[in-house]
Each structure stands twice: as structure tokens, then as C-alpha cells.
Image (cartoon, grey):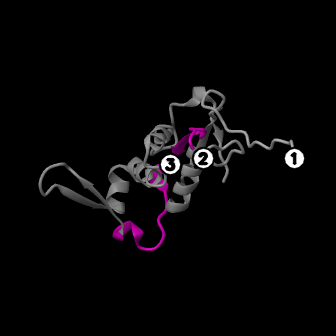
Amino acid sequence: MNTRSYNTPSAKKEEVVHNWYVVDAEGQTAGRLFSRIAHVLRGKHKPSFTPHVDCGDYVIVVNADKIRFTGNKLDLKEYIRYTGYPGGQRKETARNLLDRKPEAVIENGVRGMLPKTKLGRAMIKKLFVYAGEEHPHQAQKPEPFNF
């Protein structure tokens, strides 16, 4: 009989340390960037990852307006939303949304890669996206995250 106990440690909400990272989106391919950001928000880059605990880190994305789409996606990819009124379905191409509101492109892409639960809604709140170089989170001392 083996008396050894091999338990994988499970992270607890109180013990998790959330770091702050800055990601520069300039020249990055959209989908690859979104999946990497979702990976960090979820906490899968940490050895202490636990699926039912929010162990991810905060991510600040700068230069959202300089993100890159491959192929014809700028003109063919459509973002669909619904106003709530009859006949209120609105479609917008990636090019128009990137010109009008570049933060929404990254937020939409990352949100789609997170769990569709209360935990996923808590994770998306740790994402901060800015169109330019500047961000108001200097006090948190964010580190650059290199993929």
C-alpha cells in the first residue's frame, strides 16, 4: 500500500497575485494577439493556473489603432450588433470599426476567447485598451509582456 499523497496545489482567490502587463499592438496580427491576451487574462501562463479561480493578470493594450489584419479581413470581416429594436441589426466592417473605435475591435476579439460565464466577465474587466501610446496606469508599474 502506498501512503504517499500527491496533490496538485489549487490556487485560492486570496492567494493569487495579479501582475500588470503592457502589450504594444502595433504591427501585431489581430487573432494571434487576441489569443495571447486571453491566455494572460485567464492566467494560463502561470504554473498555478486553476480553471475555477480568476488567477489571470491585468493587461494594458496600447496602439490599438495600429493592429494588423491579414488578407482581405479589413473589408470582409463584419461586426454585428443588435440595438434591441425590431429590424435593429447593425453590421460594420473591420475597417470602419477600426477607424471609428479601435478599442472595440480588441475588446470584441478577446471577449470571444474567454469563458462565457461569471468568471469570464470578471476576466474581461482586467483588460484596458487604448488607441494611442499613452495610458493612465503608470502607478501600477506595468511591465512589458513579450510573447
Name of the residue lying farthest toward the front: 1
Q: Could you give the CA–CA distance between mark 1 and mark 3, rounded to whole angstroms? A: 56 Å
Dot 3: within a 10 Å radius of its alpha carbon, few (fewer than 14), some, or many (20 or more) residues?
some
Which portion, as a residue range, is magenta?
52-76
Question: Residue sitting at 50 percent across and 60 percent down?
Answer: 30
Question: Residue sitting at 59 percent across and 42 percent down?
Answer: 22
Measuring from the top left, give residue 121's x and y in whole percent.
44, 41
Work out whether residue 29 can be spotted. no
Q: Earlier in the sequence, mark 2 or mark 3?
A: 2
The residue mark sitting in front, 2 or 1, is: 1
State the residue in front, 57 or 122: 122
Relative to 86, say whether 145 is above or below: above
Residue position marked by numbered label 3 in the rendering:
63
Residue 119 falls within the magenta-colored stretch: no
Q: Amino acid at mark 3?
A: Asn
Q: Earlier in the sequence, mark 2 or mark 1?
A: 1
Q: Disc 1 on helix, strand or loop? A: loop
Residue position marked by numbered label 2 in the rendering:
40
Q: Disc 3 on helix, strand or loop? A: loop
Q: Are marks 2 and 1 in contact (CB under 8 Å)?
A: no
Residue position marked by numbered label 1 in the rendering:
2
State the residue in front, 91 or 42: 42
